[in-house]
Image: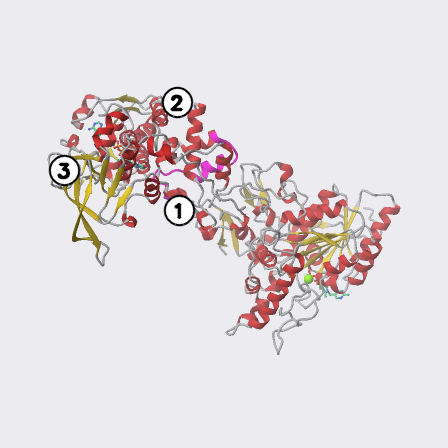
Amino acid sequence: MEKPFAITLDPGSSLANRTGSWRTYRPEYLDRLPPCNAACPAGENIQAWLFNAESGDYEKAWRSLTVNNPLPATMGRVCYHPCEGACNRQHLDASVGINSVERFLGDEAIKRGWKFVKPEKQSGKRVLVVGAGPAGLSAAYQLALLGHAVSIYEAGPAAGGMMRFGIPKYRLPRDVLDSEIARIVDLGVELRLNTHVDDLKQAMAEGRFDACFLGVGAHIAKRAYIPAGDANRVLDAVSVLRSMEGAHEEEMKPLLGRRVVVYGGGNTAIDVARTAKRLGAEESIIVYRRTREKMPAHDFEVEEALQEGVMMKWLSTIKEAGEGELTVEKMALDENGFPQPTGEYETVAADSLVLALGQDADLSLLGKVAGLVIDQGVVQVDAAMMTGCPGVFAGGDMAGNDRTVTVAVGHGKKAARAIDAWLRGGKYEASPKPEMATFERLNTWYYSDAPKTVRPVLDIIRRQSTFEEVLGGLDETNAQFEARRCLSCGNCFECDNCYGVCPDNAVIKLGPGKRFVFNYDYCKGCGVCVAECPCGAIRMVPEEN
Amino acid sequence: MSYQPISFYQTGTFTVGNRLLAPDERSVQAQVKRYNSLNSGHRACQGCGEALGARYAIDAAMEAAHGQLIAANATGCLEVFSTPYPETSWQIPWVHSLFGNAAAVATGIAAALKVKGKHDVRVVAQGGDGGTTDIGFGCLSGMFERNDDVLYICYDNGGYMNTGIQRSSATPPAARTATTMAVGAEPGNPFGQGKFVPAIAMAHDIPYVATATVADLRDLEAKVLRAMEIRGARYIHILVPCPLGWGTASGDTIKMARLAKETGFFPVFEAEQGVVTGVLPIRKKLPVEEFLRPQKRYAHLFGKQPKVDVIAKLQALADRNIRKYGLLGEEH
Ligand SMILES: Cc1cc2nc3c(=O)[nH]c(=O)nc-3n(C[C@H](O)[C@H](O)[C@H](O)COP(=O)(O)OP(=O)(O)OC[C@H]3O[C@@H](n4cnc5c(N)ncnc54)[C@H](O)[C@@H]3O)c2cc1C
Ligand SMILES: Cc1ncc(C[n+]2csc(CCOP(=O)(O)OP(=O)(O)O)c2C)c(N)n1
Ligand code: SF4
Ligand SMILES: [Mg+2]
């Protein structure tokens, strides 16, 4: 071949030089477990649905979210969001407002009328769910998606459990709850209201059920012995809150009176005290035997109650309920942090005393069920949520001491998957958890500064006199902003960094949604991609030889 | 800053790409079909900042020139690792000059193209800091002074790395090299007067001068694209960490460049006609120690008794850069 002047060889390409042979370590893509997901009692894949919300695909985000939780609009209001407590972004500025984005997606679904997709095939199996609280609803939803015929027997006049008969309206408007329950029922779930199950064995036999899930909650108020004169009104918190549902506010006012004292330090105590305030009580006082730091109620709830004018008496126990007044003994913490009586007394004026000392489960329906183990009022279940009686599963408040809507939803889901496996003659195994995407795994240099979006709060006057919702929601622009604050911990979000920073062009970009692969023919194993991956989705592993 | 930063899309303008951005808002390097002007199979060390910087810069220049680009390349790592005869990693017309005359060779190419009326074909010259700030400096100054239509890119890794890490006039003070050992009263490279070629280029009042690092791709690309909009002599000086010469982990190359910028040790700015027109501000100011400590060439400063006086002198250099170029930005 004719070559130009002074040229004797064709130029060869360096592609002939497979620099991959230099490698002693190789990079590998992986999905690590984001701390939010790890912390979610309902097992939501938060990072994944935020990923969809980031690009504005809210329906996809909602569908991804509802794989694990059918109640996002509800949970976006009442969940205590342990996810946010675990969020890696808190070490940068403030955790991602996961809860507010969840609520936005839930509200968006209601607004746009998104429905669940019915399964194509029915299994022919029948499952009984006892109780239409979050545990029962979650189980029913998952079982229906798996193609089983589900009937919920609910003792009360409406579904929702403590979400309806406990949590006040100013935190969870009932139209929101109604919409989310209706969507589950629309899947073909049979909901029998006013149907109290007294004898589980009988109910199962009569309905020819193949398995059952129990989610009867914990509704019996715990009592404390307080000597009370006839004239004094001593009530329990769950009954007060239950009677709020459907009752006219004017009917409730005389029940509590002008000066209300609530005894207890949990969420329920706070809700009753705030409810009393809204019913026009001039004084609504919480009496608790330990300190504010020791209160089981969440700090933000205590704060909201204080803002509304609820008063708190910490380190105090109620000794006696007399006519129009209570005798309170002051307590002091001993060296172990336990409250001890001091012998100092005072009186507090009160028209009514509401006890909010926790609840026990009513387990009388289980009388004839063989093999069941109950320990301190809690039904014992195995890792698959099955009780000692084969085919009988349980979850929610009755089956644990971590009593929240979120835990109940998680229990319901897990039990449903286990019931499905059990009905097929198998045993449910949870998939193994990938390694954690800890903060140290991230390269946070790459994320823009973006402060957390604050949700609007109802003005204080209306918070003291009405049951309007206190906390507002996000709109589309700020919900998307908030979603985009997610660092996508441990999961590739296609920022192209690995593709860009490789000095050897050894990363192949597969295009939108398809992520990347390494070209090990040329990757020298320098590790720049690992160091510069913002979200910690690459690791280095030693080469075999 | 020569580019419009993306205010907030999860990662803003910091990452190479971002799936949330429109294609035209993404970097050249994010494109599936990018030029890869410097192809795989080159023999640069693991994690070489120079190989990375060269692909970043030349791909951007190719983008601007619609693929019509010729490069003259001085002797040095970039030349040696990319073209062991008869292989080449270059996917562009590329000429190896000598160690000291890349600017002159490029000037000649530009002149020839002018004579042939090929105005669409653009010319770059590139070399290491040795080839630029030392031996090639005369040719470079001439190219500036004549305002030849060449973009000269210097890949500054702070030494003659290809021949075994000897000192250059761009080696920072106190750094250990093969010719400035960490021995004696003043170990490492002596504190001289310094020779910052971007400032010397500015003194020629040429149309465009910029500095960049491999840690800020968007900034680097914007500067190359801006330079390519202009005809005449242009100079871009890119800091490219060298894991071998600096004694850093191969995976830390970009981190080192970032630390150089965030400590103010290396000022990132641009200038037109001899006047500074923009700086890339420090995001989170760090003490210069953060930049020095990971490097083995500075290990002698961090022995049992840290040489606080030397570290303080290096800090003073960084502080002077911060003052001189206003690196803390407007907010500070
Ligand atoms: C005042 C208050 C506020 C709370 N606030 C929050 C909050 O903000 N966030 C949060 O996460 N958690 C909150 N909780 C806790 C949360 O409500 C419960 O943990 C959750 O509702 C438990 O769900 P579950 O399905 O186990 O039981 P439940 O919600 O109690 O539902 C059980 C259902 O079973 C029915 N049932 C019972 N026995 C039978 C029977 N024999 N036959 C048929 N049906 C039966 C009941 O009528 C009820 O509808 C609050 C609780 C209270 C009391
Ligand atoms: C005239 C001449 N003197 C010396 C050399 C040997 N030499 C080749 S590369 C090099 C150093 C290159 O240093 P630099 O320009 O900084 O590039 P780097 O290798 O650091 O990228 C030297 C001294 C040469 N090729 N020609
Ligand atoms: S010696 Fe330095 S500049 Fe040369 S190839 Fe190795 S890392 Fe790159
Ligand atoms: Mg050099």
Query: Considering the numbered disc 1 on the image, is that residue within a helix, a strand or a loop?
Result: helix
Q: Nearer the viewer, residue A332 or B237?
A: A332
Say what amino acid the circle numbered 1 marks.
Ala
Q: Residue at x 54, y 38 (%)?
A: A514
Q: Which mark is residue A86?
A: 1
Q: Position of residue B227 (x, y in %)?
A: 74, 48
Q: Distance from label 2 to label 3 (Cα)?
A: 65 Å
Q: Is residue A485 left or right of residue A179?
A: right
B113 vs B23: above or below: below
Decide which of tag 2 and tag 3 comes sooner along the chain. 2
Say what amino acid the circle numbered 3 marks.
Glu
Q: Which residues are magenta?
A: A38-58
Decide which of tag 1 and tag 3 comes sooner along the chain. 1
- Which of the two marks, 1 or 2, is nearer to us in this view? 1
Mark 1: few, some, or many residues within 10 Å (few <14, many ≥20)?
some
Q: Distance from label 1 to label 2 (Cα)?
A: 38 Å
Q: Nearer the viewer, residue A519 or A345?
A: A345
Q: How many marks?
A: 3
Q: Position of residue B293 (x, y in %)?
A: 55, 65
Mark 3: few, some, or many residues within 10 Å (few <14, many ≥20)?
some
* Label 2 sits on residue: A120
The colouring scheme, among rainbow, by chain, secondary structure or one colour, is: secondary structure
- The verdict on residue A40 being magenta is yes
Q: Position of residue B292 (x, y in %)?
A: 57, 64
Q: Quadrant of residue A391?
A: top left
* Label 3 sits on residue: A323
Q: Position of residue A335 (x, y in %)?
A: 23, 59
Decide which of tag 1 and tag 2 comes sooner along the chain. 1
Q: Quadrant of residue B254?
A: bottom right
Residues at discs 1 and 2 in contact (Cβ within 8 Å):
no
Residues at discs 2 and 3 in contact (Cβ within 8 Å):
no
Q: Residue furthest right?
A: B115
